[in-house]
Amino acid sequence: MKTFKKTVAVFLFLLLITFSEKSFSQNVLTYFPKTDSYAGCVIVKGDTAYIGGSFTSIGGLSKTNLAAVNMRTGLVLPFINNAFTDPVVFLLYNQNKLYFVGGNSSNLGSIDLTTGNITNWRPRLTYKGTTGNPSGTGKLTSIAVYNNKIFMSGAFDSINGVYKKGFAIVDAINGSLDNSYSDLESTIVALEQDKYHGIGPTTIAIKDSIFYFGGVFFYNINTGQKTSWNPNPDNSLIKTFAFGTNTIYVGGGFSFIGNQLRNSIAELDLINGNATSWNPLNNITSNGVYCIGHAKTTVYISNLSTTDYLESYDKVTGAKIDTWALGTSVISAMASYGDTIIVCGFGKLNGVNYGGLAALTRSISSGVNEVNKFIQKISVFPNPATNKISFTLNEINNKTLSVIITNILGETVFNNTLTYQKDIEIPVTDLNNGIYFIKIQSGNNTYAGKFVKE
């Protein structure tokens, strides 16, 4: 065990000393592991990020198509080592089980996170297609969970051998069909025949018993009634959702939604469906917003145009913060952890190959890269630290120092004014294990560093 801890400490230290200033400029957390190939989906539960794709390694460790990463340390966890022969394209969490959809979106299964074993939950999708050919493989386009029931939509016409046209609900425990919401099913099927031609909607989602269906209509699962909440977009095919506390961020190809002019992205009130005052001044064209996610203070979007971009916007003002060129790829999934966002599906960010997986944070931008401040990098030692950290400052004209330490969530864990001396010590015994960023302000000078607490 001591040898393992020593190895981890050395690994983290090497990661930190290679954490370049370029990483700060675009807020990419370089301690986060890379995959050797495509990573297409991610969800975060607690301090763990679950990542799916078509890779064979992550962080230099052998993992096939599915992995778990500790968000505080960036270490790949000894999750499940079973080889998944099919790429994982969707992930869903429910009651300590991780549901996965693999291959061409028809290979469904789940993992018990307590035991690490694959369960016997195995619904089967098939699809004849419009030509009436013998049943082939069905395909999911979206998946959601509510009250131990899994809601699925996509290009299929049967599940478990029972006719279901593009939409079905199965029990989250045993995978059997659930027919509790026949009115919802019939409404969706009718819409699919008219609008989607038998293929499920782009996006479904559920929050607080309200079922959101691709921007077309909204349904109260508990009462069985269609709700009056309707932002009425001029292009009703909403491509992506991201729920806030009392609002929902939506992206698509619309120009008018929630009674306001909005260009492909909007924040909507969950009570009345109106667009809020949040209105990022972007120039999105072509096919609009493909993927959207948000962290503590920041909204991230992936748009489709001649050159694809990932962009970040302030959650309050709507001001643009950063832009990353994606080349010809797009972001397929995002998941947040405090003020950090994990993005999947791309090839490169600003020409740098990240293997389709990266973690970005604004905490560096707001805490270290302040505008019009001269920033000097400081070395923090010991690193990794256990009980205390130390650093040395030279040529200080002020008698006091403002010292702020933030964690990977963007939370302030230390904020104090210290009397200047050449060698500074700060106790860190009470901090949780993980990555931390330190900023020291003295007059017009700003100093920045980072360290690992173990």
Image (cartoon, rainbow, N blue to C red):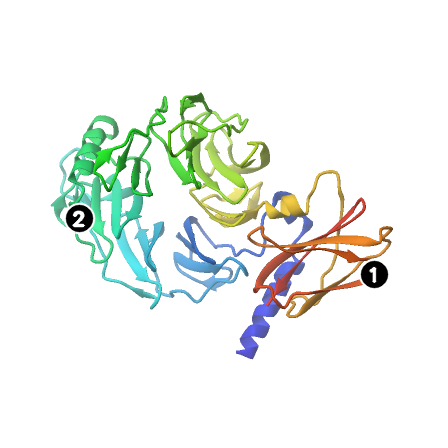
The reply to whether residue 67 is visible in this rendering is: yes
Q: Which residue is mark 1?
A: 421
Could you say which is closer to the camera, residue 210 or residue 362?
210
Residue lying farthest to the bottom in this orientation: 2
Q: Which residue is mark 2?
A: 178
Question: How far apart are labels 1 and 2 at the CA level?
Answer: 68 Å
Query: What x and y, as percent, mark residue 410?
Result: 58, 50
Query: What x and y, as percent, mark residue 109?
Result: 27, 56
Query: What x and y, as percent, mark residue 449?
Result: 70, 55
The reply to whether residue 255 is visible in this rendering is: no
Give the side of residue 389 with respect to residue 343, left or right: right
Between disc 1 and disc 2, whose residue precedes?
2
Question: Image height check: is 408 above or below 12?
Answer: above
Which mark is on residue 193? none
Give the secondary structure at mark 1. loop
Q: Quadrant of the C terminus?
A: bottom right
Q: Residue at x 59, y 53 (%)?
A: 30
The kind of residue tagged 1 is: Gln
Could you say which is closer to the camera, residue 219 or residue 309?
219
Verify CB contact (< 8 Å) between mark 1 and mark 2. no
